[in-house]
Amino acid sequence: MDLYSIDYVSLESKWIHDREGVNMAYLGETIKKLGFGMMRLPQKDGKIDIEQTKKMVDLFMAAGFTYFDTAWAYNGSEDAVRQALVERYPRESYQLATKNAAWINCKTKEEAQSQLEVSLKQTGAGYFDYYLLHNLGESRTQYFDQFDLWNWVQEKKKEGILRHVGFSFHSTPDELEEILIAHPEMEFVQLQINYADWENPAVCSRACYEIARKYGKPVIIMEPVKGGMLATPPQQVIDVLKQAEPDMSSASWAVRFAADLDGVITVLSGMSNIEQMQDNLSYMKTFKKLSAQERQTILLVQEVLNQISLIPCTSCNYCSKVCPMDIGVSGSFTAMNYLMLYGSKEIALGQEGWLVGGHGKKHANECIKCGKCEEACPQHIQIRKELENVSHAFFAE
């Protein structure tokens, strides 16, 4: 297909349809649209580099940005927040968010609730502007139900310890809708949204965003640069972006795509050094909605990504229902597609570790090649062959 013969009129119409939303005031509307995600802070000698983090916080605050995101589960991050932010700036001058991961080694509600006390102690913040039930979806949601954390966070909100309560989410649009119907008291949702995952069936960025907006929930966006991969995208993508704006970084297109959506509280960027901070500030300090031509550029990039040869897995997981070895087929294929798209084995292995081993599944190299999966696959994928390719890519000695 000729990439430059795409019907821009129909694509632009689709974009406008995708972006339809209600123009109304919402929680966090006045917060500037770049948030400091403090999961991937700079490192020195195997620890968070506090001095560099302080400089990054200073640049961020000086540019008028005020939203900081950390979590109980982010090793060392809350303590870094205390040293770099809380002890150096008036409490009312910024918004601080942290999270409760009840599914991590919690056997009782007391253990789950104690994460808030730890977060308060580690940050020294006194209260949290935004508090999230962390990483809902799949088997993880049951812990928040079992420990009745939904009512507990409302009690803490009444006490003034928590100002606003929501949740972060990694699963299907249907499950997101179920949670929002069951818990209309939740004030916001944090979702993985980026232009590469907009129609990705393994992530469903657009569909999840539309569910959140359907129920009137403002959205905090995480992973706008897809863990750094859209900062260094495939060369075909770089060529399109540089032709459109030679002086703009690849990351800037990803962050601005997310910030352009309606109902966004802020877009979290996990900045790891001063250079990344400076780049983000250079275009977000005076952020404006994308122009029609800029939207066309992103639509073209999405088309380019769609044409890169990938395993056509839709993550329906019919194969897993019949696999006698309980192989993590869809997770293996998602990781392999990451490798083919972005060329980073380290990031792809991280995806494989989470989507396969992290979900209790066995790895591709444990396949016994029985073929039952291929009989169940509606996409007619040669699963045994593709799993062998995954094994060679990730596990060959």
Image (cartoon, rainbow, N blue to C red):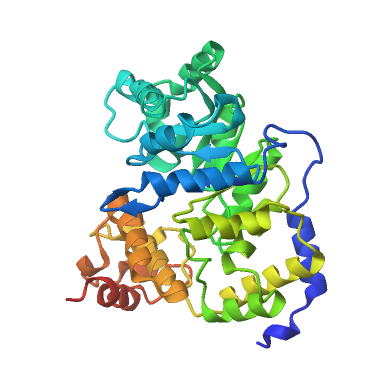
Above or below residue 382? Residue 18 is: above
Q: Is residue 150 left or right of residue 103?
A: right
Residue drawn at point x = 28 percent, y = 60 percent: 327
The image quadrant that residue 148 belongs to is top left
In this image, 391 relative to 140: left or right?
left
User: Where in the figure is residue 108, as x and y percent of width and height?
Assistant: 29, 21
Q: Residue furthest left?
A: 397
> Where the C terminus falls, by quadrant?
bottom left
Q: Quadrant of the N terminus?
A: bottom right
* Residue 171 in view, yes or no: no
Where is residue 298? Give x, y as percent.
68, 68
Q: Nearer the viewer, residue 306 or 93?
A: 93
Q: Could you tell me residue 72's position as x and y percent?
A: 37, 34
Residue drawn at (62%, 62%), measured in percent from left and top? Answer: 252
- Residue lying furthest bottom: 2
In this rendering, is residue 365 above or below 5? above
Picture quadrant of residue 303: bottom right
Instruction: Count numbered badges in the picture.
Output: 0
Q: Work out whether residue 309 or residue 325 is closer to the camera in this orientation and state it.
A: 309
